[in-house]
Image (tube, rainbow, N blue to C red):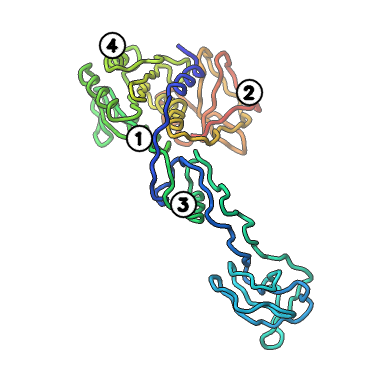
Amino acid sequence: MIKFEEAFEIVQSSAKLILPSERINFTSAMGRILAEDVFSDINMPPFDKSAMDGFACRKEDLKSDLEVIEVLPAGKVPERIVGVNQCTKIMTGAIIPDGADCVIMVEHTEDTDEGKIRFVKENTNTNICYFAEDIKKDDQVLEKGILIKPQHIAVMASVGCTNPLVYKQPLIGIISTGDEIVEPDRIPGKSQIRNSNGYQLIAQVLRAGAVPNYIGITEDTKEATFQTISTALNENDIVLLTGGVSMGDFDFVPEIMEKAGVDIKFRTIAVQPGKPTIFGTHENNKFIFGLPGNPVSSYTQFELLVRPLINKLMNVTQKSNIISLPMGADYNRRKSVRKSFIPINIVDGMAYPIEYHGSAHIHSYVNADGIVSIAIGKVKLEKGESVDVRPV
């Protein structure tokens, strides 16, 4: 076995090349990784504009009754200059007319004579959004490597970036092995179980911003497994295979991987769950993971090893979302020869262990907020002890 930290470094260092980029319409860019810096083509705001509905006037005239000389909606260019004891009724977003240096709120005024208003407060803010105070032309507004979110789409729209350059999404082949596995729409017979791993991995791949390619369940024979793995390596960037990687009589996946030209980098990791995890590389920047058949093991090792590889292939530069929290209760374990990962809930800013029965207990993750690790040699996490929480 190798330590988890060594396995992580092997996976990361194996990715020598990032994926190529492509231009797409910005309306389809949600969840993609930006492959270029984005700059503004205009000043924002492009003019001094009103921050609210009100009256544009001169501050020095606020103690006088003000004549309303124009009504100015957003999108219309002012026709009148605001002079002494004058104002323009203005709507949010409209251009500040020449002569005015503030906008008083409608609710801070009252009507006097016909066509005039009076300011009824002592003071006012300027209530003006000034020319280029948010962004100047040619300012950088988005950074290469970010995961594009809805707010980034809005920024792209505001600066005219309608065809951003993004990294291509890796295609992830997903294979399930085992004659005992049946698809979810079938009632399992004796000694059979439904295939939860394959569909769990599809969802995890989608969440990671990659494209899942569900290949299906392959027979537990060397010939069928070899053919499936060989084809999958040719057609996908990363291949994920679950089951058949431990020490049973029918667990011949490592042998078949090598026959298919895979350079196996490691076969077991000192972690719990996920000890029998295999990783290998193939020509032309292709990768394959043999993940354990237990659903918690495959879920956890995807998040710990596969997802970071996907991020690297797409040149993701965003910081980790791991947060540090105190334990809300003690947690004990019997053995400490492997690094352990356990599910937790976050309650009032503290991490509480969830009842967890082992690597087949995927239901323990249904309401989990994250996972925390316990180092090799450590048997107890104490209440109040700071732990790193990886959201799930």
The amino acid beneath tag 4 is Asp
Give the number of the mark in front: 1 or 3.
Answer: 3
Give the distance between the C-alpha atoms of the residues marked 2 and 4, in whole angstroms.
41 Å
Placement of 55 over or under 17, stated as above or below: below
The amino acid beneath tag 2 is Glu
Give the distance between the C-alpha atoms of the residues marked 4 and 3, in whole angstroms.
57 Å
Identify the image quadrant of residue 122: bottom right
Give the distance between the C-alpha atoms of the residues marked 1 and 3, in whole angstroms.
31 Å
Q: Position of residue 377 (x, y in %)?
A: 57, 13
Q: Residue under label 1, please give it.
A: 202
Placement of 281 over or under 303, stated as above or below: above
Q: Residue under label 4, please give it.
A: 249
Q: Residue under label 2, please give it.
A: 382
Give the number of the mark in front: 2 or 4.
Answer: 4
Placement of 161 over or under 314, stated as above or below: below
Q: Earlier in the sequence, mark 2 or mark 3?
A: 3
Whether residue 320 is visible to the viewer of this picture, yes or no, is yes
Give the distance between the C-alpha atoms of the residues marked 2 and 3, in whole angstroms.
51 Å
